Amino acid sequence: MKERKEAIAVCLTYKDVYEDYPFQDKNWCVIRHKSNKKIFAWIFDKDGYVWINVKTDPEWRDVFRQTFSSVIPAYHLNKEHWNSIILDETVPEKDIKRMISESYDLTAPKKKIHAL
């Protein structure tokens, strides 16, 4: 995965999500959950590459950062909970998709438990 349109297309395969451009700058695309409006992917161009910011479980945050030199503390977001993936073709697509999926799950609406 290298192109912006590929990253957006992968994110849009998830259930009940939509593409949004919340800033005056069209460089910043976000993918949100429809029901709670939470963002699970920030997609933007920086330094000649497409970047994706994804939420990550703190237990996995450092594993991804240590495994891939192109996964770094998130640009412009909380570095404890978010990573940036630089799409420079050094991170395998399956791992990019895994990180996007984890971000989707971490930001998804919480399921309500009904008492009997």
Image (cartoon, rainbow, N blue to C red):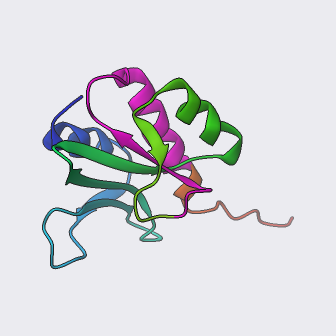
Total marks shown come to 0
- Image quadrant holding the C terminus, namely bottom right
Residue 47 lies in the magenta stretch = no
> Which region of the structure is painted magenta?
78-105
Coordinates of residue 89 in the picture (x, y in percent): 27, 24
Q: Which of 7 and 111 is in front in this view?
A: 7
Residue ranking furthest to the right: 116
Q: Which residue is drawn at 46% across and 54% down?
A: 74
Q: Nearer the viewer, residue 40 or 51?
A: 51
Instruction: Where is residue 106? Give x, y as percent.
Output: 58, 52
Image quadrant occupied by the N terminus: top left
Q: Which residue is drawn at 43% across and 41% down?
A: 100
Which of the 4 image quarters holds residue 76? Answer: bottom left
Magenta highlight on residue 79 = yes
Query: In the rendered view, would you say 18 is above or below 7?
Result: below
Q: Which of 76 and 35 is in front in this view?
A: 76
x%, y% of residue 38?
45, 67
User: Is 63 displayed left or right of 37 in the figure?
Assistant: right
Position of 98 relative to 19 (above/below)? above
Identify the residue shown where x is 25% and y is 75%. Answer: 22
Image location of residue 58, percent across then percent down: 68, 47
Q: Is residue 52 left or right of residue 114?
A: left
In the picture provided, is 43 more to the left or to the right than 15?
Answer: left
